[in-house]
Each structure stands twice: as C-alpha cells, then as structure tokens.
Amino acid sequence: MTPAVPDLAPRDVPPLHFACTVCDEIHPVRTRPLPGVRRMPIYSHGPRGNRCPGGGLPGKTWIQTRRLPQWQDMTDLDRGAVLMFLWKVHWERSFAYARENYPCTYRDAPALVALTKRDACSHAAQVVKELTGEPGDRAIARYLGEAEYKRLYDLALHTEWTERRCG
Ligand SMILES: [Zn+2]
C-alpha cells in the first residue's frame, strides 16, 4: 500500500480514470450509472485470487488522483484565479464558454502553471467541489465570506491588469 505523499510529481490521467485508494494505481471507473451512487467505483484489479481491496470502491478524488494541490496548498493569487474563472462560468452560465474565453490562469504553483488551459479550468472547478462539497462560484463565495472572497478576487484581477499594462 502506497501512502499519499504530497510531494510526488503530478501525473496525467485519462478521462474516467481514478487512482485506487489502496494501491494508488490508475484504473477506469464503471460508467454505467448505479441508482443512488454518486461516485462510480473503479474496476477490480490485481492478480486473480488476490484482488486489490480497492477494486469495486470509488477511487481517490480528481485532484488526489493527479497529485495536484488542494485549496489549502494554494497561494492567494492562485486561489484568486479560481474565483475569477468560476465567476465567469457563473456570469456566462456556461463552463465551456468561460473555459474557451476566460480560462483559469494560474501563476504561482509550478504544478498548476504547467497544466493545459483545459486542465487548469477542471482543477479550478474540482478544487472548490472537493473543498465545499458543492461546485461553483456561489459555493466558494459562501465558504469564504464576502471580505475574503473580494480580497482574493481583487488580488488576481489586479495582477491580470498589471500584466496587460506591462505587456
Ligand atoms: Zn488497488
């Protein structure tokens, strides 16, 4: 069994695959919906007669599977980037449109800066969902409170303005 070590390098993971909570290997999830089950279990794996006990259970979360920073590991500037992006999703009422036109732009954590725009936007959505249990701008606004939300948002906004002004 491999314990979760936070400083392991991030890894690429195909869609609909998650890390096993026991052995940390990447496996696909069942895609046929089960009534009343929110997180699909990963397929059973390991040698016949000695299957890994993590098979048939939900895997690690999206962020844990990729070994990316959680909210508590992020800088204020990167947190502000999450808020700016999720506000655009809320305002435009379209994740896909916001991702295309106003993608989440991380500037601090190397593991986040290295993400594609698409994965950065997915990370922004997942980090809030895993922190608050709910997706989206309103969930993180409730969690942070108005003053902290505004402080982080303004930090990212002013950084973006400064970058534009300085080319
Ligand atoms: Zn396993």
Image (cartoon, grey):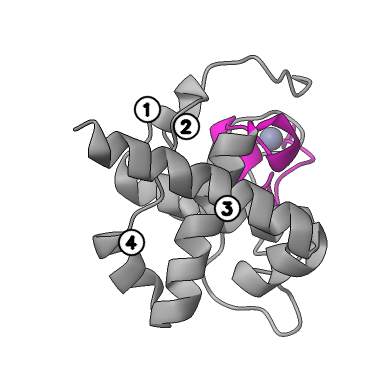
- Mark 1 or 3: the one toward you: 3
Residue 108 magenta: no
Q: Quadrant of the N terminus?
A: top right
Which stretch is magenta? Answer: 49-75
Q: Earlier in the sequence, mark 1 or mark 3?
A: 1
Query: Of residues 155 and 135, which is closer to you in this image?
Result: 155
**Label 1: few (<14), some or many (≥20) within 10 Å?**
few
Q: Is residue 62 visible?
A: no
Residue shown at 71%/85% (left/top)?
A: 35
Q: Quadrant location of ligand 1? A: top right
Identify whether 12 is placed above or below 156: above
Residue that carries the numbered disc 3 in the rendered image: 153
Residue that carries the numbered disc 2 in the rendered image: 112
Amino acid at the residue labelled 1? Ala
Residue shown at 46%/54% (left/top)?
A: 122
- Mark 3 or 2: the one toward you: 3
Q: CA distance from mark 3 to mark 4?
A: 18 Å
Q: Position of residue 105 (x, y in %)?
A: 39, 43
